[in-house]
Amino acid sequence: MAIAESWHVRARGRECAATQTSFSEGETIVTALFPDPESSGYLRRDYCIQGWTDHQASGEIAFSFWRTTYSIPTGNEKPNPVEKLSAEEILRRLVDEDEDHTENTRFILAVMLERQKILRETDSQRTPNGILRVYEQRKTGEIYIVKDPDIPLSQVETVQNEVIILLENNGNSPKPVETTEAPSETAAEVPTETASIPVATGEVPSEPSDSGDHRDPTESDSTQSAGDAFP
């Protein structure tokens, strides 16, 4: 099974994973990611400062951790399918789907949202498969782990255009327009000049040669030109 390179991790918890003490608005907490032994993803845990200090003494090593400010989560409303999806909603969907061909698009979306100050990069880790960048949603605390595909400069504009198309089409790539080609005519359908050549009265038509070519000699030029026009 291929190891996933991007993950969408749930929003921050409401209490410390070590002490079970509820967080308060504006409190400084520590968010940590740990490898999930049951999958190729990661587990998230949030700690108060004292709880994190106690946890570090246990010797368990986190994949990534950082300090952040806790804010009380708001109700998660389901997006209206009729409404236009935001860039973050598109990123969330692409990360959840984890399709190989959207790797570059996911990274550009994450960078764009970081510049808009919706996400913030909290960490980056080099792995055998490349650099993984950790982004946190500033308000909800949701985490997106996105692989840095190291896009060549020559391809950046192309990927940016793909992102623009996704945003304009509500997160969907437009289907290519199918063109219906008219059936090509065959040489047999092209009229020849044979019918327009009258046979003189009393003249006996020539017999076909023994070479096996039974085609009327008068057809040779017209048939050849039809074949050239309709390969």
Image (cartoon, rainbow, N blue to C red):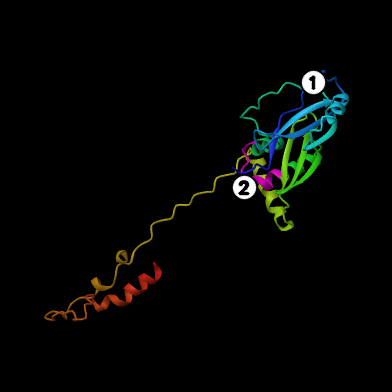
Residue drawn at (80%, 19%) of the image: 20
Q: What kind of residue is marked 1?
A: Glu
* Nearer to us in this view, 203 or 53: 53
Q: What kind of residue is marked 2?
A: His
For the N terminus, the quadrant is top right
Label 1 environment density (alpha carbons within 10 Å; few <14, some 14–19, many ≥20): some
Q: Is residue 123 visible?
A: yes
Please check the rendered image and state whether residue 102 is part of the magenta-colored stretch, yes or no.
yes
Q: Nearer the viewer, mark 1 or mark 2?
A: 1
Please check the rendered image and state whether residue 19 is part of the magenta-colored stretch, yes or no.
no
Residue drawn at (68%, 40%) of the image: 6
**Percent x, y of residue 9:** 71, 32
Q: CA distance from mark 1 to mark 2?
A: 38 Å
**Percent x, y of residue 144:** 73, 37
* Badge 1 element: loop
**Percent x, y of residue 163:** 68, 45
Q: Is residue 15 left or right of residue 210?
A: right
